[in-house]
Image (spheres, rainbow, N blue to C red):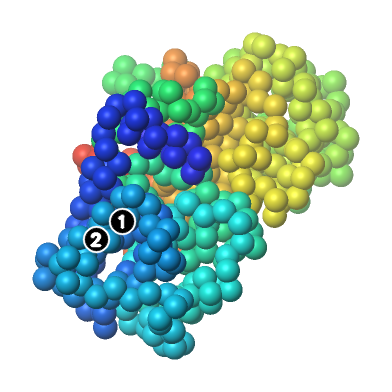
Amino acid sequence: MYIVSSNEMRKIDEYTIKEIGIPAIVLMEQAALKCFKIIKKKIIKQKYKKIIAICGTGNNGGDGLAICRHVYFSGITAEIILVGSINKLSECAQINYDILKKLGLEIKYYPEKIKFSKDYFDDCLVIDALFGTGIKGKFSNEIQELIKNINSSNSYIIAIDSPSGLTDNTENIPIAANLTLTIGSYKTAFFSDCGIKSTGKIKLIELNFPQSAFDNCLNENKIFVNKIEKKLLYKLLPAENSCKTRNSKITIIAGSYKYSGAAQLAIKSALKCGAGLIYALVPKSIANIIKTNIPEAIVFALDELDGVIAATENNKKIINNFLDKSDSVLLGPGLTVSEHAKNICEYIINSAKCRVVIDADGLNNLAENLEILNQNKSAKFILTPHPGEFAKLIKSEVCHIQNNRLEYLKKIRIYDNVVIVLKGKYSIIADNKNRYVNFSGNSLLAAAGTGDVLAGMLASITAKLKDDTLIETVKLSVFLHGSISDFLKFKKKKMTMYAGELIENFDDTLAELLSLNYEYIWSLIQK
């Protein structure tokens, strides 16, 4: 399942029409009928003052006009507003316009013949088929006023394909939809800060585009939806003949006097996800705290300086001993930033021979020396920055990154032994070939410590599934992390959450996922 830019989608459309021979009007009819079925359910479920379809003159408007025909034949009355000149109707939009006129349906025209009061759209269901992805440049004053009136109303807005105005031109304020019915593929613009605010819920309307259209119109570095294979979930269950030493051994180097909680969350998370043995290497000042709170972990106290792990030869000798026997390593949660911590991080990266998760202060200590990751080909590295940490890695600003997260991931060099997880709403997983957008998860994850829990999950799952590719185990971990929050929000009806609840609900979420049909799981994620 691909995620494409608006330009790529146009190429896919064109290829399907010209090379395969499926007429544009056929594709439009498929899309309109599928959109109508969803809209009809919404109309039946909720009573609205009226249904208003805002249609432009391009193919997005053609989709809207075709939807209006299906609405009419179902016995529902809709107000149709055409925005723009009749003389500028696209070929397919013209066909659907002519049909509506022959059926005797009234069509109102904006801005020539209709003006809107401030409460015009209140209590209505508004179908946005104004521009979709087909707009460039700055909106006219009339369009800006129209969108402002719609957005300021208490209407329920359904955007067809894409909220109108959601483009690279940040001068335009897009339609703020409650539901987006995106046609053919998800669009890259949806996953920026502006896109997240504008799309509301997103539902994919799949059309019969041939695989050859995607093969011919997309470049080698593709963007996919993160859909995991259910068989991977079963691999998380312990084998009947397993034991703690076979079940994965993980070394966690984390914590400081100031931040012992981050280390504890990561350790507990790794244990809950099925680690056989956890070696926790922490500063002396917090070793007894970890031992007391997490008796299942094997804790080693490291020399420290001002509450931070010191870069002593004794510490390096202890660390190296555990690196040699580990299936994975977690480096960073609560470590703090210092010259000693940086020295320790670089030592571990140079010495490891397994999968290494680098999180939080592990990343902050390495921000000026990411090239070191390419020097050790015996190890594989998973970087887990949040936007602030990622901004340091690429020397940019968070606001710029959040406006185009998929594009900004191209600005960091991803070596063939590295996978990056850019955390946030729709976390993005990337290797040196492709990018994957994760749909599980919700706003409950906006709480302190949830990143530490993810780091522990990654260390545990990538160790347990060491025979599977690194990218697949990372995708699974991120999917599960988000799914637990979905389980808490939608199954347990939680309104708030603390990070520890992700750990506590891992078992129940896994059991729930294993019991469900995968397509049903996917429908829940498109919440």
Asked if disc 1 and disc 2 are in contact, CB closer than 8 Å, the reply is: yes
What's the amino acid at mark 2?
Asp
* Horizontal side, residue 397 vs residue 127: left or right: right
Which quadrant: the N terminus? top left
Q: Is residue 376 above or below residue 523?
A: above
Which residue is found at the position 32% from the left and 55% from the top? Answer: 93
* Horizontal side, residue 401 vs residue 427: left or right: right
Secondary structure state at the residue bearing disc 1: helix
**Where does residue 374 sit, x and y in percent of width and height?**
72, 17
**Quadrant in the picture for residue 104:** bottom left
- From where the camera sits, is residue 335 visible? no
**Where does residue 34 sit, x and y in percent of width and height?**
22, 51
Which residue is found at the position 58% from the left and 69% from the top? Answer: 140
**Quadrant in the picture for residue 520:** top left
Which quadrant: the C terminus? bottom left
Residue nearest the viewer, comparing 55 with 112: 112
Dot 2 corresponds to which residue? 98
Q: Residue furthest top?
A: 378
